[in-house]
């Protein structure tokens, strides 16, 4: 209410937009607390730093968690060897689909979303070997 009254007072002598805006900004400044001596943080500074979190819980979409974990470990090993992020080797969704379908050959592997020619050429033999070892009870 105080701000409204302060902005109306200059209008008694004649209204002008610059006069109104000046009166309003002065009234707002008068009602606010004085600025602290602490430096204001930019939005980037205000964000809390990201902490490494524990591995996420296994998705409910994973039907064969043991195979999925072996595939994730394989992906991490390959990613470290190639010095690339794990998602560059294979998406998590792709690993889930591989674990759930347990493909027996390259045609079945190729049918999975995220598996293309490059993936088949680079990793197809390894992935099929992991799946076969799981089927045979070796892992």
Image (cartoon, rainbow, N blue to C red):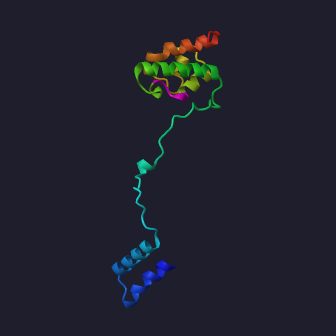
The quarter of the displayed image where residue 129 is located: top right
Residue 103 lies, in percent from the top left, at 58, 17
Relative height, residue 98 to residue 23 (above, below)? above
Residue at 58%, 15% in the rendered image: 131
Relative height, residue 6 to residue 118 (above, below)? below
Quarter in which the C terminus is drawn: top right
Relative height, residue 134 to residue 1 (above, below)? above
Residue 92 part of the magenta-drawn span? yes
Residue extending farthest front: 37
Residue at 51%, 34% in the rendered image: 52
The magenta stretch is 89-93
The quarter of the displayed image where residue 7 is located: bottom left
Residue 119 at least partly seen: no
Residue at 49%, 23% in the rendered image: 115
Residue 98 lies, in percent from the top left, at 57, 22
Towards the viewer: 85 or 110: 85
In-image side of 25 versus 48 (left or right):
left
Residue at 34%, 78% in the rendered image: 18
In-image side of 75 versus 42 (left or right):
right
Residue 44 lies, in percent from the top left, at 41, 48
Residue 100 at least partly seen: yes
Magenta stretch, main secondary structure class: helix
Towards the viewer: 85 or 125: 85
Residue 70 lies, in percent from the top left, at 57, 18
The quarter of the displayed image where residue 34 is located: bottom left
Residue 81 part of the magenta-drawn span? no
């Amino acid at each position: 209410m105080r701000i409204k009254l302060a902005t109306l007072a200059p209008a008694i002598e004649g209204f002008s937009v610059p006069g109104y805006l000046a009166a309003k900004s002065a009234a707002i400044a008068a009602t606010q607390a004085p600025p602290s001596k602490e430096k204001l943080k930019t939005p980037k500074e205000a964000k809390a730093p990201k902490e490494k979190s524990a591995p996420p819980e296994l998705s409910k979409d994973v039907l064969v968690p043991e195979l999925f974990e072996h595939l994730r470990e394989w992906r991490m090993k390959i990613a470290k060897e190639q010095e690339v992020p794990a998602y560059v080797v294979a998406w998590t969704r792709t690993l889930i689909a591989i674990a759930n379908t347990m493909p027996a050959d390259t045609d079945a592997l190729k049918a999975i979303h995220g598996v293309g020619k490059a993936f088949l050429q680079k990793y197809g033999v390894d992935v099929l070997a992991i799946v076969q070892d799981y089927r045979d009870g070796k892992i």
